[in-house]
Image (tube, rainbow, N blue to C red):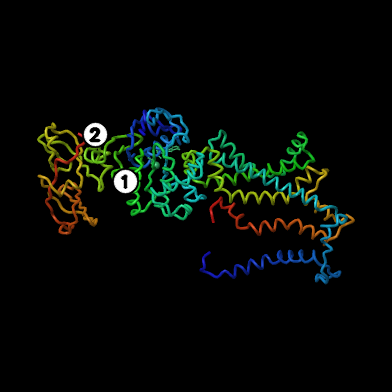
């Protein structure tokens, strides 16, 4: 950061621009812990009443089942996306593959393709494979849709590792696999970390696919759960309760962002070490 | 271990970079592959260590044909131009890597690494990471890692290119010392003639994928086989004069000046086109012939001074002499020329 001009006007401007958002979030948090008299914004009592859904399944149904499912969903995303991206990215970056160009352009196209337009095809495939209305089906579809992004990002990170390092490893007597695992992979861990977090967040927040591909399944993820809670026509509808569930749903993502925000940025720099 | 290339050919896609090269490196010798950038030195090196598959011919280590042996089984140590140290490992782990891949026991690894670190003078750096080392230290680590497995052959690709001038001088003698102490057969790739001449037993000089001459540095400098070799060796470089023989033991530069030919060429028939090469140390120091001209350039280099002398007809000769400041720009001088040391080349560039 250059110090040729003072930074405070920029901070002030950014502060003013983001103030509405910040204020809304602040009120969201306050509202979930308080009650306000009718017609007033200022709360007058502190309460855990809106969080009772955590321990009282009669309020909105069991929240822990969907939480566990969502966690499973997001973790599976991380595992699948990392396993395939780390290997496929390497192959595309380094190995003399047949159809390498075809793969590359395919990945680019898939990356830019609006995934919603694939849904009918995906639907038919799932039906055919017997995975319609199953959690595994949804996970597989969601992970595949993220793979073009993941493979592309990892290819970028592998491209940054000098070719000589790999050849030095081979000269030192290591097999290509050992070279990859012991010499190359450690140098792309920033990429793996960021990609893993993105995959987790992406899985955690997915709403469309479970809705469409598993509409009548016996599992729920938090997003569909939240959708039920937020239905104003339901008998249990309560706006503060809705806010609490929403906040509960967002919390893990906020934590991930706060903890890893610096690491997440380097995915856009393609692995340059900061 | 003797290394032999027989009719080695390498093509990339459709371009033939090396066509049928033959080369023999003697056991325990350090050979320089010297040539301008892009002439195929690295390609040759990478073929020897197995990174490149060869398209024709054979590579022999001793009597063993290794042409189809994968890199991992050739037992060749390579030092890459950018050192290629593993950035996430400490110096110790870097050097230990070839041994741990081989499955050596911990105490063995510990002992071998310490021994090679002592040889390369990096004992106190073992706990550091490559990013915390200077260029010269990285170079030593790369050498140690290449040598720790006791390879049959050591290959060095432009090992000094990334160092500053002072370190280059230091590492030049260090690499040579380590090679002599281990007695390993080594091939050094460089485009710097000073490096090749100062570090190696013999030089193989290359141009455009072809080896032009293999000789000891002194022989190659004294008796280059062609114009290219003569021009590549020597700093400041040789001056080439185009002209014809007079028939009576002299040489007529095409601008007009007449210079003596060395005695061995005195019998050449007249009007033969030739190039005459004059090295700067053979003009202005000793010799029976006198040449008159005007100083047109003076470059003091500390211990020596370099002069350009323009003759009456515009021909420029170069002279290097022990530092002197009694001669100034524009002064007329009459300096001796050592005709016996002159080099002559025919129209095709071959030495005569
Ligand atoms: N992997 C490659 N693919 C295509 N051409 C290459 C490759 N490696 C080297 N070349 C070409 O081969 C020639 C020799 O290269 P190289 O051996 O690296 O030269 P140098 O003598 O400078 O080390 C160059 O013209 C270069 O462009
Ligand atoms: Mg090279």
The quadrant of the rendered image in which ligand 2 is seen is: top left
| Closer to the eye: label 1 or 2 | 1
Q: Position of residue A27 (x, y in %)?
A: 76, 66
Q: Position of residue A63 (x, y in %)?
A: 81, 53
User: Residue B177 shows which numbered tag?
Assistant: none
Between discs 1 and 2, the one toward the N terminus: 1
As helix, strand or loop, the secondary structure at mark 2 comes to loop
Counting other residues with Cα less than 10 Å from the Cα at mark 1, is it few (<14), some (14-19), or many (20 or more)?
many
Counting other residues with Cα less than 10 Å from the Cα at mark 2, is it few (<14), some (14-19), or many (20 or more)?
some
Residue lying at 77% horizontally and 64% vertically, measured from the top left: A28
Residues A240 and B170: in front is B170
Residue lying at 78% horizontally and 41% vertically, measured from the top left: A134
Is residue B95 toward the left or the right of residue A262 in the image? left
Residue lying at 14% horizontally and 46% vertically, measured from the top left: B337
**Badge 1: chain ID:** B
**Is residue B186 visible to the viewer in this orientation of the structure?**
no
- Write down the residue under mark 1: B195
Task: State the separation of the CA atoms marked 1 and 2.
Answer: 25 Å
- Write down the residue under mark 2: B350
């Amino acid at each position: 950061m250059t110090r040729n001009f003072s930074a405070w006007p920029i901070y002030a401007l950014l502060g003013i621009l983001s103030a509405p958002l910040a204020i809304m979030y602040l009120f969201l948090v306050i509202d979930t812990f308080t009650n306000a008299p009718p017609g007033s914004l200022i709360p007058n009592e502190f309460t855990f009443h809106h969080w009772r859904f955590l321990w009282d399944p009669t309020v909105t149904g069991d929240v822990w089942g969907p939480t566990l499912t969502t966690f499973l969903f997001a973790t599976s995303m991380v595992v699948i996306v990392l396993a395939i991206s780390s290997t496929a990215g390497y192959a595309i970056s380094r190995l003399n593959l047949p159809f390498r160009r075809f793969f590359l352009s395919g990945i680019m196209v898939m990356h830019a393709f609006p995934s919603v337009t694939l849904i009918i095809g995906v639907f038919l495939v799932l039906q055919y494979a017997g995975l319609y209305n199953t959690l595994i089906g949804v996970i597989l579809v969601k992970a595949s849709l993220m793979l073009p992004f993941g493979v592309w990002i990892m290819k970028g990170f592998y491209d940054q590792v000098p070719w000589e390092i790999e050849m030095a490893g081979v000269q030192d007597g290591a097999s290509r696999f050992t070279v990859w695992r012991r010499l190359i992979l450690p140098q792309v861990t920033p990429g793996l970390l960021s990609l893993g977090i993105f995959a987790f967040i992406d899985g955690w927040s997915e709403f469309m696919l479970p809705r469409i591909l598993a509409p009548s399944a016996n599992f729920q993820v938090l997003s569909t759960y939240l959708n039920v809670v937020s239905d104003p026509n339901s008998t249990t509808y309560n706006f503060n309760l809705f806010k609490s569930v929403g906040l509960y749903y967002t919390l893990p993502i906020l934590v991930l962002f706060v903890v890893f925000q610096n690491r997440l940025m380097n995915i856009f720099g393609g692995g340059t070490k900061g | 271990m003797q290394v032999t290339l027989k009719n080695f050919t390498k093509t990339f896609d459709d371009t033939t970079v090396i066509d049928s090269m033959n080369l023999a490196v003697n056991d325990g010798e350090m050979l320089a592959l010297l040539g301008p950038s892009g002439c195929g030195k690295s390609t040759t090196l990478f073929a020897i260590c197995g990174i490149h598959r060869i398209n024709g011919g054979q590579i022999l280590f001793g009597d063993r044909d290794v042409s189809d042996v994968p890199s991992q089984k050739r037992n060749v140590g390579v030092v890459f131009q950018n050192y290629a140290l593993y950035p996430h490992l400490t110096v110790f782990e870097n050097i230990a890597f070839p041994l741990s891949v081989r499955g050596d026991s911990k105490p063995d690894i510990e002992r071998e690494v310490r021994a090679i670190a002592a040889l390369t003078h990096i004992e106190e750096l073992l706990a550091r990471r490559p990013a915390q080392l200077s260029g010269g230290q990285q170079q030593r680590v790369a050498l140690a890692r290449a040598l720790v497995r006791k390879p049959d052959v050591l290959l060095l690709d432009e090992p000094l290119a990334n160092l500053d001038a002072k370190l280059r001088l230091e590492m030049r003698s260090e690499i040579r010392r380590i090679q002599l102490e281990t007695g390993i057969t080594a091939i050094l790739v460089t485009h710097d003639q000073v490096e090749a001449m100062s570090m190696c037993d013999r030089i193989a000089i290359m141009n455009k994928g072809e080896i032009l001459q293999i000789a000891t540095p002194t022989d190659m400098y004294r008796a280059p086989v062609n114009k290219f070799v003569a021009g590549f060796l020597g700093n400041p470089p040789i001056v080439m004069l185009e002209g014809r023989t007079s028939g009576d033991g002299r040489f007529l530069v095409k601008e007009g000046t007449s210079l003596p030919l060395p005695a061995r060429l005195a019998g050449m028939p007249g009007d033969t086109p030739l190039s005459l090469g004059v090295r700067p140390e053979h003009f202005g120091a000793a010799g029976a012939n006198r040449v008159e001209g005007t100083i047109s350039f003076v470059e003091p280099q500390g211990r020596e001074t370099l002069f350009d002398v323009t003759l009456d007809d515009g021909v420029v000769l170069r002279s290097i002499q022990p530092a002197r400041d009694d001669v100034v720009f524009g002064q007329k001088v009459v300096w001796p020329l050592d005709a016996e040391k002159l080099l002559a080349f025919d129209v095709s560039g071959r030495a005569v």
